[in-house]
Amino acid sequence: MALISVTVSDEQPEENKEFIIWVSRTLYGLCKITIYEDDLRYNGCHLSELLELLHQAFANTYVVKDILSSESNDEVKPVAFFAQCLLSIYGALLDKEVDDLEKRAAKYLLKILLQISNYHEYHKELTEINQFCVIIEGLSKRPKQDDAKRIWSNLQGEISSNQLKKEKSSMIYISYDRSDEKFCESFIGELRKRTSIPVWVDFEHVESWDDMWEYVLPVIQSATVIIPILSTAYGENTDKFQEVSYAIGTSKSQDKSKKLIAVTTEPDFSFNRAWMEDLIGEHNLVPFDNNTDNVVFKVCAQIIHSKKPLMKCFPRITKRS
C-alpha cells in the first residue's frame, strides 16, 4: 500500500498517471469486497485504511473521473456505492462505544463523498438517493461535522422542488399513551426541527372531553407516516390497538402504502401484548435511546427510506443504523 504515496503529490508526471489509476482501481475494488465483511477487514486490511488511501488518490481529478465513470456489471454505480457505504456505517459517527476503526472508516467515507460533491456533474446522482440526503442533512446539523456541512451545502442547488412538494403533501400521525405524553412532547419537538412534514398529535388539537375517535379517524386516513410511541402502557391500551389496526387496514384498502415506524420509550422494551407484535413487529422499530435527538435522527432516515430498500446489498445496515 506504500505505492499509493505516488498519488498524493500536487503534480504528477504524465507517465505516472496510468500507474496511479491502476492503484486507485485496485483500492476501489478492495473497498467493494471489504464492505461486506462483518469486521470490515479483508486480507488483514481494514476498510478505513483503504478509504484513507483512496481519499488521497481522489485529490487527483483524473482519478475521480476514472473511478466514477467506470463501467461494470455491478448493480450499484460508483457514486451510489460510496453513498450506500456511508448509509451502512454512519451510525459509527453517533455511537461513542463503536470501534475507532469503524469511526475512521465513516470519517473517510464522508471525506470521499465531499470530494465527489465538489463536482457538479455528480450532484444529481447523490440527491436521487433520498436516504443519503436525509443522513447528510442530519449530520450537517451536528457539531464537528464540517465535511457533512460542506456536502449538504454543495447539494443545495440540486434539491428539486418536486421533493419539497412531496414533503409538503405528507403528514405524520403520532400514536401514544397518555402516560408517555412528556416523552412524546420532547420527541415531537426534536422531530419538527428535522423535518418540515406536518406532525399531528391529539393533545394539540383535541380537548380531553371531546370524542377522540371522531378527530383521529380522518387524520389516520390521510397520514402518510404513522409513528406509535411504544411502552408497556401502550400495549395495555385497547384504543391504541384500534388506531394501529385502522392505520394498517386503511393502507391496504386505499392501496396506499403508509410508513409505520415504531419508537420505544423503555430500555430493553419487549412486546407485552400479542397484538403489538403481530401488527407492529414486522415494521421498522427504533429502539429506546436516552438521547432523543438520536432517536429522531433514525426516524427521519426511515421516513425518507424508499419503498425499494437502497441497502439491500449491505446486510450490515441493520446493525449500524
Image (spheres, grey):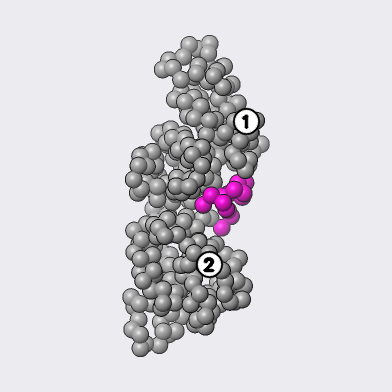
Local SS, label 2: loop
C-alpha gap between disc 2 and disc 1: 38 Å
Which stretch is magenta? 307-321
Query: Mainly helix, strand or loop, the magenta region?
Result: loop
Q: Would residue 275 be counted in the magenta stretch?
A: no
Whole-percent x and y of residue 179?
Answer: 41, 77
Whole-percent x and y of residue 64?
Answer: 49, 28
Count of labels in the image: 2
Q: Residue 182: in sight, yes or no? A: yes
Q: Is residue 231 left or right of residue 137?
A: right
User: Measuring 43% from the left and 51% from the top, which residue is drawn there?
Assistant: 134
Q: Quadrant of the N terminus?
A: top right
Whole-percent x and y of residue 275?
Answer: 59, 76
Q: Please, what is the three-letter code of the amino acid marked with disc 1?
A: Gly
Compared with residue 74, is residue 19 higher up or lower down, i.e. above or below? above
- The residue pinned by badge 1 equals 44
- The residue pinned by badge 2 equals 269
Which label was assigned to residue 275? none
Whole-percent x and y of residue 48?
Answer: 52, 34
Q: Would residue 317 be counted in the magenta stretch?
A: yes
User: Measuring 57% from the left and 33% from the top, which residue is drawn there?
Assistant: 46
Q: Please, what is the three-letter code of the amino acid marked with disc 2?
A: Phe
